[in-house]
Image (spheres, helix red, strand yellow):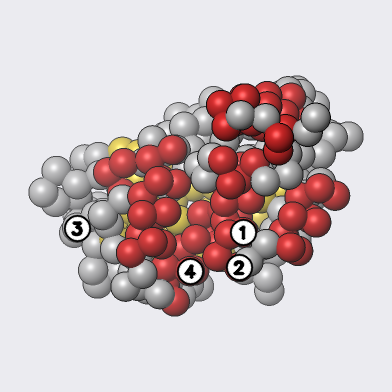
Amino acid sequence: MTWMNLPLSAAILTVTLSLETAIVPSLPAQSDRPTITETSPRAWQVSQTYIPPNREAPRTTAGGATRGGCLENSGLLRSLMPANNLGLTIAEYPTLYWDIPSSKAEALEFELRDANENRLVKKTLPIPSTPGVIRLTLPKRELPPLAVGKMYHWYLTMVCPSEDSGDKSGNIIVDGWIERTQASPTLVKELEKAEPSDRWALYAAAGLWQDSLTTLAELRRANPDDSTLADQWEKLLKSADLDPIVEKPLVDCCTANR
């Protein structure tokens, strides 16, 4: 008897157990990591929410959200990252997202570093004219593709005005980690068979936060009045404890100044 012939409650339990056993536990070494994006066939149809892998990002000093400085109306600068502050991706040049509140900031500064804190790229970005969720795709012209199995540390700094041009104490910083991994053969086949509107859920079930978020965000940009996509966006963000961002608009930004 296959799980498709079982009662609904038993089928859900079977899919859940299959998914849990498919994710490889955390390994300290960054080299020779196994693929960690295995997911049971049709698991996404049962639970269309983000299922985090059993992995943690290194400890950081800034974290995924912060307030203060030149923010207005008790705003909060927040990254769209899961609770462990680690976004997995299969993309060579993934896209990152942040919720930018109203502020008196002069600019945004983005940095990407390797695991040893060697700077790989730095970009100055404009403050969006409207508060909301912005995106930045890693630049192909200035950066080689992310290496599989290596962790990268990113920082986003909100540059606040200061009488002393060298004083950085008022700036607001959020940070997080990103890692490129490989899709399992099972996931590749499921993605090939799935409708474009369903692929975000496959990524979410496989623990690929960046790909799930980006895929669904692009669907919402193309179909801003689609209530089904709005509901799916809400479900995805809430599954990663990002409830305050659900109602925030997706705004056009950013083109790097330098």
Nearer the viewer's eye, disc 2 or disc 4?
Answer: 2
Mark 3 residue type: Ser
* Residue at screen point 54% across, 40% down: 47
> Dot 4 corresponds to which residue?
219
Count numbered badges in the picture: 4
Cα–Cα gap, marks 3 and 1: 33 Å
Q: Give SS at disc 1.
A: helix
Report how far apart the C-alphas of labels 4 and 1 lie in the structure.
10 Å
Q: Amino acid at mark 2?
A: Pro
Q: Quadrant of residue 257?
A: bottom left
- Cβ–Cβ below 8 Å for labels 2 and 4? yes
For disc 1, the neighbor class at 10 Å (few under 14, some 14 to 19, many from 20) is many
- Quadrant of res 199: bottom right
Q: Which label was assigned to residue 102?
A: 3
Q: Position of residue 242 (x, y in %)?
A: 36, 41
Q: Quadrant of the N terminus?
A: top right
Q: Are dots 2 and 3 in contact, CB under 8 Å?
A: no
Specify the amino acid type for callout 1.
Arg
28 and 25: which is toward the camera = 25
88 and 233: which is toward the camera: 233
